[in-house]
Image: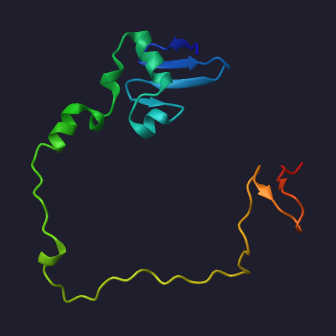
Amino acid sequence: MAYNVEWNGHEQFEVIGAFQEKIVVHLGEKTCSCRKWNVSGVPCKHAIVGMFYMHYPPEEFVVDCYKKEVYLKAYSRMMNPMHGPDEWPNSNRSPLHPPIVEKLPGRPKKARKKQLGEEVTKNGKKNIKKRDKK
């Protein structure tokens, strides 16, 4: 897909897509108006187009938690195996139980709803495929 990039001079771009949609990218703040970069921390396609325009490597704009060095640092310590339940200390608290399930109001369904294209039988007639309502 082809994108046109219009640079405003301060690491901010307007990326124009094939359908003339305009997306604003700010490399300094690591934001994009499509919000994919803001949410995930990984540059979206609009931001990468701006990075290529400025000849910046996209790897430098990824959030640190996705980098190899941070991963290796997080898992550098050895994890010791845990003892089994027979070696756990006894507790004087009451055991946990699952929540009480309350019956929902209304009449329960007799059968599940069929999906589109699934075979339906009506009053002993042959199987009919369910159609979309028009």
What's the residue at 49%, 14% (across, down)? 8
Q: Residue at x 18, y 44 (%)?
A: 74
Image check: 2 left or right of 70? Answer: right
State the image coordinates of residue 87 (x, y, percent, origin top left): 11, 76
5 shown above or below 91: above
Left or right: 51 with respect to 72?
Answer: right
Residue 17 position, x and y percent, is 61, 18
Q: Residue at left 39%, top 29%?
A: 30
Total numbered labels placed on residues in the image: 0
- Up-down: is 125 above or below 104? above
* In this rendering, position of residue 90 left or right of residue 98: left
Q: Could you say which quadrant of the image residue 83 lies in?
A: bottom left
Q: Position of residue 23 (x, y in %)?
A: 56, 25
Note whether 29 is above or below 10 in the view shown: below
Q: Nearer the viewer, residue 8 or 38?
A: 38
Residue 71 lies, in percent from the top left, at 22, 38
Q: Left or right: where does residue 115 sit relative to residue 103?
A: right
In which quadrant will I find the N terminus? Answer: top right
* Identity of the residue drawn at 64% across and 80% down: 104
Colour scheme employed for the rendering of this structure: rainbow
